[in-house]
Image (spheres, grey):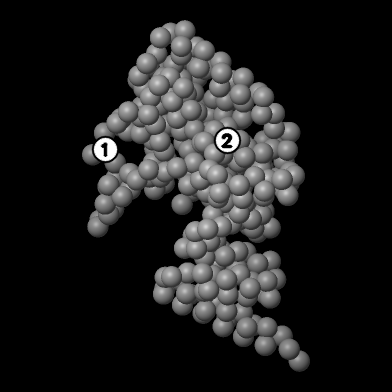
Amino acid sequence: MSDEPPPSESPKSGVSEQRPNQAELLAAFARLAEDPADELAVAMLIAAVIDEQLDPRRVEMQMQALLGDAQAQGISDVEGVLALLRGKGFGQKPLTAVDLTHSSIDWLLQQRQGLPIVMAVVIITLVRQLGMQAHGINFPGHFLLRVDGDLVDPLALAIVPAESLPVPAGGSLQQMLAKAGPVSMGFRMLNNLKAYYLQLQNWSAALAATDYQLAMMQHTNDITALVHFERGEYRHRMGQAEAALEEYAKCAQLTAQPMLRAKAESRIQGVMSELEGTLH
């Protein structure tokens, strides 16, 4: 599920949809599978996917400036951090049409707006440097975080009571509030990029995003099986039937879920029938 409103017609100026230094990025995402980085480092990787002109030093300086202001004001609790961020203009501009820049921590720090999960990275990084405990929460549809026991909405920059959160019938609030580590957050950020590309029917760009997801989740068969199924769908839409068959076959091989395996096998039969229909 994506955290994004509908996409705007085109990305903001200065942001490229090209894949910058793809081999290096793939290697960096693959390293996360072996040695997970912190949330800020993962967010920087996502920003590098979006913007080939990314300046990591600018992000570091802006984060250090926020930390310096918080320390100068003697802030030691989450309410103080949230008030500081609101006072600096974060969370004051509602997102309407979202583009790729809103998944970039560099853009968020410059423009004071972005997706909830990216804002969560800023808060998590800042409060930890101030001595608090924090982690992300992979809440469906709207990313949350927890700081020293308080549940925080990173878009509203406010503490929220758990009982106010929507829970679907038969759902478990405890499960929906499960901890999200840096790798899980990176995977969700890439899902947001895919959602943007899919609404534009840019199958090749969506496929590129899954390259990074497969690299970072290479040891997690249940997730990689789902990604391979998605890739089969993209390949099929791109007219790459044989490549689609390979992706569906990988999904069927990796998944432990009978329903997903059956779905992948059904897709394989469908694509094979299409190929047989093209033979003369």
- Residue 71, image x and y in percent? 46, 11
Mark 2 near mark 1, Cβ–Cβ under 8 Å? Answer: no
Compare residues 269 and 133 and report the one nearer the observer: 133
Residue appearing at x 51%, y 36% in the figure: 39
Q: Can residue 102 be seen in this view?
A: no
User: Is residue 256 visible in the rendered structure shown here?
Assistant: yes
Quadrant containing the C terminus is bottom right
165 lies left or right of 12: left
Q: Residues within 10 Å of mark 2 (few under 14, many from 20)?
A: some
Q: Give the residue type that dot 1 points to.
A: Ala
278 relative position to 3: left or right: right
Identified at 65% across, 67% down, the residue is 235
In the image, which disc is placed on residue 41?
A: 2
Corner quadrant of residue 14: top right
Q: Mark 2 falls on what kind of element?
A: helix
Q: Alpha-carbon distance for marks 2 and 1?
A: 29 Å
Q: Where is residue 151 in the image (x, y as percent from the top left)?
A: 32, 33
Nearest to the observer: residue 12 or residue 229: 229
Q: Residue 162 carries which label?
A: 1
Name the element at disc 1.
helix
Q: In this view, does 156 lie to the left or right of 172?
A: right
**x, y (%) of residue 249?**
58, 75
Q: Quadrant of residue 147?
A: top left
The label nearer to you, 2 versus 1, is 2
